Structures are given as C-alpha cells and as structure tokens.
C-alpha cells in the first residue's frame, strides 16, 4: 500500500515537473507556407483548412505544449517561398516548416532548410528533394512527382490497353517529372508517347494545344491543377474530343476541390494518386466528415496531405516529449514514424525522406448525385523507386524536359 502511494506521488511529481518545463519552453511554432492568393489559391486554402482541422482535433497541444501556426502566403512563386521561409525561421523562430505546395518552391527552399538545419515536412513533389539532391532536413508527406506515375504507366498499357498517348503537360519540373515517370513504365511495357505538347505553367487558353492533338491517339495524358482543370475539360468537350479520345493523368487533374464545379465533361477520366476522398476506411471517413463540416466540400489530396503532415509533426513532437528545440532529435523522430491509420492508408518514410504508401487508380464517377474519384485498383506500398533498385535508379538521368526512356523491356 505504501509502495503504491510512493509510486503515485513520484508520478505526480514527474507530471508536474514536465508541465512546468513545457510552460517555460513556451509554444511550439509551425511555419506554414502555402499559396492563398494567385492561381493555386483554392488548393492553398484547402491545405490551411486541413491543417487547422487536425490541430483543432487535438486542441492545439502536443506533449504538454501549445502549438502555434504562422501562415505565410507564397502565391505559388518559388522566390517568395524562399523569402517567406527565411522570415519564418529568422524572425518568427519556428521550430518546423510545413506546407509548400509547388515543386519549384520545394527546390528553392530545400538548400536554405539544410543550411539552417530546420526540420521541414513538405508537400512539394520534386523528385530530387528525396533523390539525387536529397535534402537532409526535409521529409515529404505527399509524393514525388513521378511516384504515382510509375504504376500508372504500367496500368495504362496493361489494363486500359492504350498503346498511343499524347502528352499535354505544363512546361516546368512537375510536368517533366510526372510525364517522365509515366513514359518510362508505359514505354517499357510496349506503349508509345507519340506527341508532347508543352503548355505554360499558368496557361490561360488550351485551345491552341487541343487543336494539335494527333488523331492517332488512344488517350491524352494531362497534368492540371487549380483553375486549369475547368479550363481544359470544358474546352476539350467544346472541341468535340470527349467522345473520341480518353483523358488520363495524375490525380491533381481531377482533384476533389474542383469536382463540385464540374459536370459530365470530366466523368470517366482515370488518374493515379496516393489518395481519394472515396476511400472507405475509418480514418478517411472521419477526415472527410470533418473537412466537409469545415470547408463545405469534399477534401482533395492537397487537403489530405496537409492533414497528414500536421499529424506527422505532432507524432514527432510526442516521440521526443516536446523537446523540439533539439532539432536533430526532432528530425530523427520524424523519419522514424510509421502510421497505418491515415486517411490515405498506411505510410512510412524511406531512407531518403519520402513516403512508401499505396497508390490508387481512380475513375471519376457520379455517385449519389456527386462526382467522386472511385478507386478501381490499388498498388500497395509503392516506393518512389517503383520496382527498380534505388542505387541503380539514382544512376539514371532525372526526368527532365528532354528525358528519353530506355525503351521496351524484353518480354
């Protein structure tokens, strides 16, 4: 009996000491960089809503310390992303950086993050952030640009049975890397990219490019985001292409943030990504319900990646009992997390800082009067290196604008 009271007293003393220590340390600060104005503002607002949703669920506290978020708008401009990152670290004193939507912005910020040794949990998809030029202080909770495209290239040839594809993609690193991953596995399996139509990163009118699509194409492989989605699909329909040629691509092209404003012009489009709001698991049902209540619409991958990123940070905080001032220990904890109950499904971080996770093949369908990305196939535990050996993969040239794949594999 006495021993029990002694143990209880010791526990209370430890809890009191821990609480006092946490109060003296002050709040944990997360610096969140996101476009809330400009062409990608809607995606950015989804990211903010999802971040806030998770932090509200835990009462903005972890390991006995309050959490504060400082949000900075980078307008989707890489130079601005870097400037805002400097401000968050050097003026606001944040303990971790998060957000960062666009691939060029991630590439711009990574060298600074490494120079300051500040942990960063980013959405940005640039392949080489976690490959040839990998940043030691960055982990990603989204995807590499090419990660979902490796299985999708194979799926397009083997399951969809498309042999000739026209690529219509934005002319910057995200477009190059997505198309490179798709082209590599599509052509390894016997398909052929017969035409590449490069469009400006912020294209205003797709009609000059749509008019050039080869009549030999079985499908158009597209990469769209933000308001580009509405522009492309409406013009594609108006040109009479919808009934003649299929549209496929990366999941940003049918993101749930845009589906409520669209109609039959986007039905039937098949894409690949690590998330769909239609996933039927307990964590996703909870996330979707909460996001709908907060944002009055279904969440897309931008929202889910932000929600998961927030949880990843919090799990790292808890693993080190809130000692985020020890940035090295914090970074190490972030790399070791493995979770199975995320809205997207199970996820862990590989040795290079990138998720190993499921990739879903999705098809836009109308269910209950609402468009959704119905999951039609799942590739489990997909690495950023697909089925290639990492050391061999990294010896190959990156997916640039001029990338040419080695050709079909021996059957």
Image: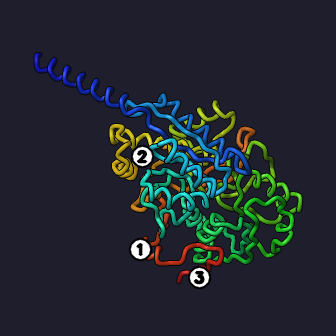
Callouts 1 and 3 close, C-beta under 8 Å: no
The numbered disc on residue 391 is: 1
Q: Secondary structure at mark 3?
A: loop
Displayed quadrant of residue 370: top right
The image position of residue 228, as x and y in percent, is: 76, 55
Q: Which residue is mark 2?
A: 339
Q: Are marks 2 and 1 in contact (CB under 8 Å)?
A: no
Identify the residue shown where x is 66% and y is 34%: 295
Looking at the rendered structure, the secondary structure element under dot 2 is: strand
Q: Residue at x 52, y 66 (%)?
A: 128
Residue 353 lies, in percent from the top left, at 44, 58
In the displayed structure, 83 sits above or below 310; it is below
Tell me the tag on residue 59: none
- In the rendered structure, the answer to whether residue 397 lies left or right of residue 172 reads left
Give whichever of 72, 384 is nearer the camera.
72
Q: In the image, 126: left or right of 265?
A: left
Q: Which residue is mark 3?
A: 407
* Placement of the N terminus among the 4 image quadrants: top left
Residue at image position (48%, 60%) is: 382
Neighbour tally class for label 2: few under 14, some 14-19, many 20 plus, Cα within 10 Å: some
Q: Nearer the viewer, residue 116 or 16?
A: 116
Q: Position of residue 360 (x, y in %)?
A: 57, 55
């Amino acid at each position: 009996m006495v021993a029990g009271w002694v143990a209880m007293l010791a526990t209370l003393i430890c809890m009191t000491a821990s609480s006092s220590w946490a109060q003296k340390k002050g709040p944990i600060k997360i610096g969140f960089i996101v476009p809330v104005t400009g062409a990608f503002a809607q995606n950015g607002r989804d990211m903010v809503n999802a971040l806030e949703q998770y932090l509200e669920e835990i009462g903005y506290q972890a390991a006995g310390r309050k959490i504060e978020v400082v949000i900075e708008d980078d307008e989707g401009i890489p130079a601005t992303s870097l400037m805002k990152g400097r401000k968050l670290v050097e003026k606001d004193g944040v303990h971790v950086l998060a957000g960062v939507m666009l691939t060029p912005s991630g590439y711009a910020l990574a060298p600074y993050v490494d120079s300051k040794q500040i942990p960063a949990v980013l959405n940005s998809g640039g392949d080489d952030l976690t490959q040839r030029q990998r940043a030691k202080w960055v982990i990603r909770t989204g995807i590499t640009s090419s990660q979902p495209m490796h299985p999708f290239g194979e799926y397009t040839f083997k399951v969809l049975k498309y042999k000739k594809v026209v690529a219509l993609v934005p002319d910057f690193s995200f477009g190059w890397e997505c198309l490179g991953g798709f082209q590599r596995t599509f052509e390894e399996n016997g398909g052929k990219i017969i035409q590449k139509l490069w469009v400006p990163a912020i294209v205003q009118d797709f009609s000059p490019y749509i008019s050039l699509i080869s009549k030999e194409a079985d499908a158009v492989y597209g990469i769209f985001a933000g308001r580009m989605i509405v522009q492309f699909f409406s013009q594609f329909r108006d040109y009479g292409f919808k009934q003649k040629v299929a549209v496929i691509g990366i999941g940003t092209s049918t993101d749930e943030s845009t589906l409520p404003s669209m109609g039959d012009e986007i039905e039937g489009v098949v894409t690949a990504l690590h998330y769909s709001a239609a996933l039927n698991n307990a964590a996703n049902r909870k996330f979707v319900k909460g996001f709908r209540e907060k944002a009055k619409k279904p969440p897309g991958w931008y929202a889910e990646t932000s929600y998961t990123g927030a949880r990843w940070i919090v799990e790292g905080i808890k693993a080190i009992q809130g000692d985020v001032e020890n940035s090295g220990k914090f970074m190490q904890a972030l790399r070791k997390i493995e979770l199975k109950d995320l809205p997207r499904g199970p996820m862990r971080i590989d040795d290079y800082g990138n998720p190993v996770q499921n990739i879903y093949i999705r098809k836009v369908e109308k269910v209950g009067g609402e468009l959704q990305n119905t999951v039609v196939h799942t590739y489990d535990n997909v690495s950023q290196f697909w089925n290639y050996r990492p050391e061999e993969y990294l010896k190959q040239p990156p997916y640039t604008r001029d990338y040419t794949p080695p050709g079909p594999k021996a059957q």
